[in-house]
Image (cartoon, helix red, strand yellow):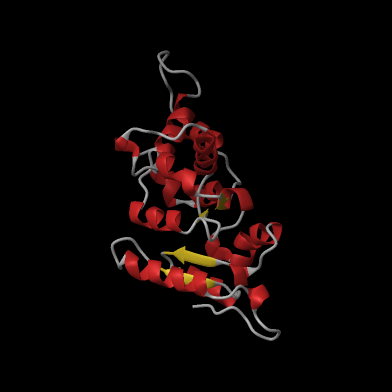
Amino acid sequence: MESLAPIFAGETARAWMKGRLSSAQVIADMGIKLDRRFRDDFLQRRLLTDCARMRVNVPLFEMLREVKTSASVVVSTDNMDCFADTFRRVRKSRRPTDRRSAATLAHWAYICDDLICSSDVAVLKSEGPAGFFGPWLSRHGMTFLDALLIDDSASNCADFRQQGGTALCWRMGAGDIAEVAAALSRWLDAPAESELPPGHRRRSG
């Protein structure tokens, strides 16, 4: 634990989340000596295993699973390369059947269509939605008018709205998921930007 404290207290974590440092580099810099029972890549493999076991907000993912037929579900996160690598790896593998894994990333990554991770785009959400979300939207022929963000940061949501998008600020344990589901349903039922008359914009919240 003492080895981890400087990483998350200083600039190392920020550089790691922005892709300027890799997980392998961070582990190497920790200087942990393993005995002969462990392979050289043990800590990196363990890190990926722990990412797969990361607990997720099951009610939120259950809600998102219900809208997959109407919208793409994309995870957007300020996170490290180990998270992005784990997300993509588990989506290529067989879905876990163990009920004990039902609240983990490995179990729920399958309902998502894609991932936007800060370590991939080299920018944090708080540093500007245009840099974080813009490239993904452009690649898929969309703008912020076509997107809705669910985030626990009020400032991230405000910035997203300033770009023309819709944002729902919600933190686990701080509000009713049913309210978010209702707002999401209203947004999905609204006409698409392409269906509106010239000079009109899709409604945003």
Is the residue 147 above or below the residue 53 in the image?
A: below
Q: Position of residue 85 (x, y in %)?
A: 54, 39
Looking at the image, which residue is at 34% across and 41% down? 102
Looking at the image, which residue is at 42% across and 72% down? 183
Q: Position of residue 168 (x, y in %)?
A: 44, 70
Is the residue 184 above or below the residue 65 in the image?
A: below
Depth check, front residue: 10 or 87: 87
Q: Position of residue 178 (x, y in %)?
A: 33, 67
Residue 169 visible (yes or no): yes
Looking at the image, which residue is at 61% across and 72% down? 192
Quadrant for residue 62, please give it.
Answer: bottom left
Is the residue 157 above or below the residue 99 in the image?
A: below
Name the quadrant of the N terminus: top left
Q: Is residue 82 left or right of residue 63?
A: right
Residue 1 visible (yes or no): no
Looking at the image, which residue is at 43% across and 30% down? 46
Depth check, front residue: 69 or 125: 69
Q: Position of residue 128 (x, y in %)?
A: 59, 66
Q: Is residue 170 left or right of residue 120?
A: left
The residue most toward the bottom is 199
Numbered marks: total: 0
